[in-house]
Amino acid sequence: MSGHSKWSTIKRKKGKTDAERAKVFTKIGREMTVAVREGGPDPTINSKLRDLIAKAKANNVPNDNIDRVIKKAAGGQDKNDYENIVYEGYGPNGVALIVECLTDNRNRTASDVRHYFDKFGGNLGTPGCVSFMFSPKGIILIEDDGLDEEKVMDDVMEAGADDYKLEDGVLEISTDTADLHNVREALEQMGYAISSAEAAQVPATYTRLEDPDSLVKMGRLLDALEDNDDVQNVWHNLENEEDLPE
C-alpha cells in the first residue's frame, strides 16, 4: 500500500490479476511468519497476528492459506530469516518515498530498490533523508456508501480515534499507532466492517506532479517497488496520486 490517502491506491488496484493478488498474500504471509515467531500462533493473545489475519481476509485470502502459513511458522518449517529494512529516497521531481521491506537477503533487496529508483528518475538516499517529513499514524479504512456522518463522528471519538475523514463513501480514520488495534476492535464491535487497518507514514507536506512524463515514471516506480516480494509498504507524499496512469 502507499500514499497519504490510501483510497486512491485501493481504487487503482481493484482490477489486479490473480497473480498480483497472490503477491499480496506472499507479503502478508511473510509478516504473519514473523508475527508468529515473535508472539506465538494464537491470534487471541497475539494482536499483531490477529490484525494480519484480518488484513489477509480483507484481501480475499482463503482461510486454508492463512492456517497453512501459521502452522508452518509455528512448526519451524519456514527456515527463512527475515529482517526489516527501510529505504528512503526521492522519486521524479522530488517526491519523497519511504520503502519498508521484509527480506531474507539484504544485498538482493538493496540492489533491487536502488535499480528501481535509478531506472525511473529517482534517487535513493541515506537513512533519515525524508523520514523527517512523515509521521507514523494508524490508518483505518471503512468502505460504506450508507454511513451517517453524525453517527460516524460520535462512534469514532468513542472508539478513541484522533481524527476522521468521510469522502466518496470511504471513512478514513487516523489514530496513534499504539491505539490502532484497540480502535479497530472497538469499531468492529460497533458493527463496522474494516477494509484495512495498519500503521502508516503520513506526510506533513506534499509534492504535486504536473508533467505527464514524471507521472508515468512515478507510476512505474511505485509499480516496480510494490511488485517486489521483499517490499511490504511504500509511503510517499505525492499529492495527486489519482493522476497516475493506470
Image (cartoon, helix red, strand yellow):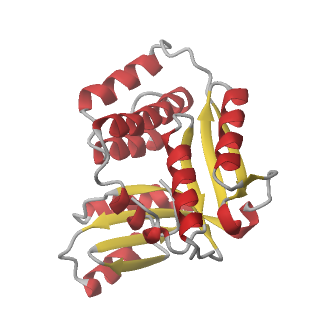
Total labels drawn: 0
Quadrant including the C terminus: bottom left
Give percent across and percent down for residue 134.
Answer: 67, 66
Whether residue 160 is visible here, answered yes or no, is no
**Picture residue at 66% right of the left edge, 63% below the top:** 92
Give percent across and percent down for residue 59.
Answer: 31, 45
**Picture residue at 65% right of the left edge, 55% below the top:** 98
Image vertical order of residue 191 relative to residue 126, above or below:
below
**Quarter of the rendering containing residue 130:** bottom right
**Picture residue at 39% right of the left edge, 31% below the top:** 42
Q: Residue furthest front?
A: 213
**Viewer-proximal residue, 196 or 99?**
99
**Viewer-proximal residue, 18 or 184?**
18
Give percent across and percent down for residue 212.
Answer: 53, 69
Q: Residue furthest bottom?
A: 150
Whether residue 156 is visible here, answered yes or no, is yes
Image vertical order of residue 32 relative to residue 132, above or below:
above
**Picture residue at 35% right of the left edge, 54% below the top:** 13
Image vertical order of residue 87 relative to residue 68, above or below:
below
Give percent across and percent down for residue 49.
Answer: 43, 38
**Viewer-proximal residue, 40 or 82?**
82
Image vertical order of residue 136 relative to residue 78, above or below:
below
